[in-house]
Image (tube, helix red, strand yellow):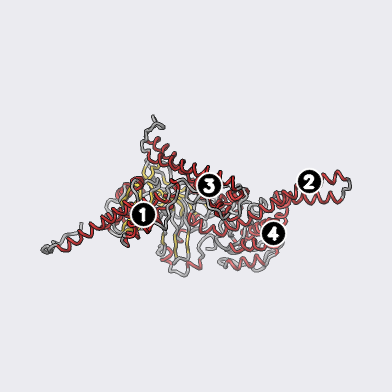
Amino acid sequence: MSDPDLTPEALKQRYPQDVVAKSETFVTRGVSKEAALGFLETPGGERYLDLLHEASPNTPLPDLQERAIKQITSGRELPRMEMLDEPLVKIVPKGQQPSPYSPFWAKEADLDAAIQQRKNLSRHFALPVASESPQYDVYKITPKAPTEVFVNTVAPTSELDGQVTKPGGARQFLTPNRQLYEPAELVKTIDNRLPLSTAIQHGIRPASKAAGVLGTAYGAVDAKHQVDAAIDTARSNREQWVRGGEETANQAARTAITGGAATVGAIPGAAAGALTSPVTGPVGPIAGGLATGGAAAYGAEKLYEDSRLQQWTKTLGREVGQLGYDYVSKEGRLLRQINGHREDLSHTTDPAERARLQTRLDAASTAFGQEAERNVRYFEGRAGIDQGWEAMHARFPKVDKDDVNDALARHIDAGKKPLDAVRGAYSDAVHEQYPRALPHEPLENYRALSPQQLAQKHQQFAGVVAQGRRTVEALQANKDSHNNVDQGWPKALAQQRQAGRVQQGANELWRDIGHLGAIREAYKERGLTPPELPAELKPRNPQAAPTRSSQTSLTPEQQRHHALAREQLAPGLRARGLDDERIDRVSAAAVSHAQAHAHRGEVRAFHLSKDGERIAMVQEGAPVSEFSVREAQARPAEQHLAQAQQTAHAQTQDTARTAAAPAAPTHAAPERAMA
């Protein structure tokens, strides 16, 4: 297979054909088996098993459970149940048909969006190597009546002993019972990735987002090290533009010839492919003996590098970059004004005219200096985004890099340093897809404020945060769906409106906390002690916690539970406006809950529900158990820990009494047949 977006044939040939065809090395990196088992104990999980049973009533329950676990663990998170009354689609290699039992489907709108964004569909849907294809047939199934589906995100996968990894990230719809749908029908045929030429014709922005000419990218390059090299060797912002234009043209030609390319937006790797026929044009033939068939990518790259075409495209691109800087960018236009004013001054002797030109020159020079300084910070910020993109995209796969770059420009324009602007850009872009997942980084540059202004802002936001926290807590405590605000609304809509108000309040509190944190950070950078916070906002000293008598007497297992709870629950609770004291209360309640259920097995994890209302505890070989966040906050942490100690003491006494009791007579149990 010569398509550079797919697994090379040379790699597949290292493995027996059956191993690849049957996906024997295919591994999903989704939710754990323990979490999936816990899900099957919930109402949604029970319905999942019911649907599997309806589809295959003669299959034993253990086999159905194993089937359910395999399907559920294909997602990054546990699925949520939804009602569906519209078609779903699936891609299969061109010429093949989907299995009548396959539960993995998607919405057509999601597939179309991935195509328009030029995503590599094989990687986006994390397809096994055996299911890769340069083209796919799209099949559609339509529910016979509204039915339940289970929605989550495709998890990352690895195959061929980890040599092939795919990030996933698509939204998938699990259909446990395909009998509830009409037979699959062919809809259309699509490419694994929309060709760049087609994308440009349809006005679709590539990952480089108007590289060079629009001044918002360095230009498309082959791999990450080339981005760094372009930044390191550039001597001016104009050179950044020029290199952008040069590399954009270079990349377009390389893509057309070698069959693939990597761009700044993703940087998945060097281009790969093969030349299949001589290419002639206005610049003459590229090479005499061109490689054919499965020639290595290096061969195609080398032929292109040695060709006259590359030199011609780079020259053309460089000229486009120069024109873009001179006539499109604000900095370039200002520089042209400066040069024009200097030229006019050199030919003018009239004092009044010279004074007028000098005034214009001074104004243009000041503006040029500011714009040039801004662009230096911007390009440094872009380098920072490129350096952190892989790790950040792995954590937040729904985030679009173009959105991060757009946010970067806003923070740079606010006068921020590159590092601060990068943090702010990621915070803004991630929040749009994953609300409050990162601390808020406000646009305001508090470092530029005077001490008096900083003090006023601190006082303002300390009060706003305190009031906002009380507001959110009041909203969360209001469980009456027919309250005075929603009186007369249907219950479902009233609950939806109430949930929306809680989320809006949490978002506002998140932003206000970000402002207050940035203000206090500005104090610390100046070597000053920030003003004292109101009592309700004072964070507890985490270093002091272990000195409490209630914690010094915790057993090693209880200490492990406490650390595990804080590690796994604190980020989500803090994003919902809880301070350290309340987080400690919830963590201590987790210790007490774990101790009460100690007989059921080892605690593996604590999970915060999406609405932030409940904590789920996962134990090995036991159903998931829960407790309320609101009830946990009603008692001090010391009381929760004391309760855990009392429970442990009582359990120890029970164990001792059992050990001291006389042994019961032993009888052989009758052998029973397995049902």
In which quadrant is the C terminus drawn? Answer: bottom left
Disc with the residue nearer the chain's start (3 vs 4): 4
The label number, if any, that marks residue 515 in the structure image: 3
C-alpha span from label 4 to label 1: 56 Å
Residue closest to the eye, 297 or 635: 635
Direction from residue 484 to residue 202 in the image, left or right: right
Q: Position of residue 204 (x, y in %)?
A: 59, 48
Secondary structure of residue under mark 4: helix
Q: Which label was assigned to residue 606? A: 1
Question: What amino acid type should be assigned to the residue bearing mark 1?
Answer: Phe
Instruction: Give the CA distance from mark 4 to mark 2.
Output: 39 Å
Q: How far separated are the C-alphas under marks 2 and 3?
A: 39 Å
Q: Mark 3 falls on what kind of element?
A: helix
Residue 90 or residue 414, whichever sits in front: 414
Answer with mark 4 or mark 2, whichever residue precedes in sequence: 4
Residue underneath mark 4: 313
Q: Calculate the distance from the C-alpha at mark 2 to the C-alpha at mark 1.
A: 65 Å
Q: Residues within 10 Å of mark 3 (few under 14, many from 20)?
A: many
Dots 1, 3 in contact, CB < 8 A: no
Q: As shown in the figure, which amino acid type bears the numbered disc 2?
A: Arg
Residue 636 visible here: yes
* Disc 4 + disc 1, Cβ < 8 Å: no
What amino acid is at disc 4? Thr
Closer to us: mark 4 or mark 2?
A: 2
